[in-house]
Image: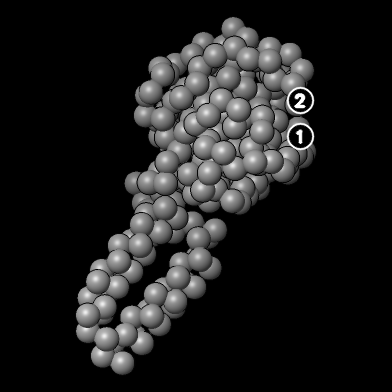
Amino acid sequence: MKMKIHHEGREILIVSFLLLGGINALLYYFKVEWALYPVLFVSTVLYLIMLNFFRCPRRHFSGEMHNTVVAPADGKIVVIEEVMENEYFHDKRLMISIFMNVFNVHANWFPVNGTVKHVAHNNGRFMAAYLPKASTENERSMVVMTTPDGQEIMARQIAGAMARRIVTYAEPGEECHIDEHMGFIKFGSRVDVYLPIGTEVCVEMDQVVTGNQTVIAKLKP
C-alpha cells in the first residue's frame, strides 16, 4: 500500500512548517536556551501528528463490487440501526455510522459504484461527532448515489467538535466508483451511510473498519 500526503493538507503543512521553523529559528538566534529544546520537541510532535492526519494511502478494492457497499472512511462503527431519514428520503433507512478520530485517515471514498444523483451542504453545529444528534444538527454534507441496479444510498459527511471544514468532490450527474475519493473532512469527524431496509449488514458495533477496503453491507438484488 503506497502512502502520500493528501492535497487538502499541503498548504496547511507548508504554512505550519514555516511557522514552527521560524519560531525555533528565532529561539536559536536569540539563544533562548531554556525554551529551545522543549519548543523544538513540541513542534516536532505537532508536525508529525499533522503529517499523520493528512496521509493518504493509495488503496484498491479487489473484491466483488456488484451490490457491495464498502466503508467510505477509516474508523470505528458507532451506529447500526434503522432510522427515519428526513432530509432527503423521508422514510426509514438502515444507517451505519463510522466515527473517525484525529489519528484516522480522513480521506473519504465512494462506498458504491453508480451515479451521483444529489449533493447538498448544510451549515450546523460542531458538537462531538459520536453523539446521535450530530447526524442532523452538525455541519454536514450529503451525497446521494444511484447504483447500476437503481438503488439509492446516501453518504453523509459530518463535522465534529474539531472538524471545521468538510470538502466534497462529488458532483450531481457524474459517475462514481469505489476506489475514488468522495471528499475529505479536516480533523475528527464521522460518515453516515443510509441504505435500503433489508440490506445485509456485514460489520458489527465497535468494529474498526478501513476505508475502501472493508465491506460494510450487501445490497439486496
Q: Secondary structure at mark 2?
A: loop
Percent x, y for residue 92?
A: 68, 12
Label 1 close to label 2 by CB (< 8 Å): yes
Image quadrant containing the C terminus: top right
Q: Residue at x 66, y 24 (%)?
A: 153
Q: Residue at x 44, y 78 (%)?
A: 18
Q: Residue at x 42, y 35 (%)?
A: 75
Pick the front one: 209 or 18? 18
Please tell me how crowded label 2 is: few (under 14), some (14-19), or many (20+) other residues with Cα within 10 Å. Answer: few
Which residue is outermost to the bottom?
A: 30
Task: Answer with left or right where residue 4 lies relative to residue 217.
Answer: left
Disc 1: which residue? 118
Q: Amino acid at mark 1?
A: His
Q: Residue at x 54, y 58 (%)?
A: 8
Q: Secondary structure at mark 1?
A: strand
Can residue 114 be seen here? The reply is no
Task: Answer with left or right where residue 165 lies relative to residue 202.
Answer: right
Percent x, y for residue 65?
A: 52, 25
On residue 88, the disc is: 2
* 61 lies above or below 7: above
Percent x, y for residue 66?
A: 56, 21
Q: Amino acid at mark 2?
A: Tyr
Pick the front one: 163 or 208? 163
Residue 54 picture quarter: bottom left
* 128 lies above or below 132: below
* 17 lies above or below 72: below
Which residue is outermost to the top?
A: 198
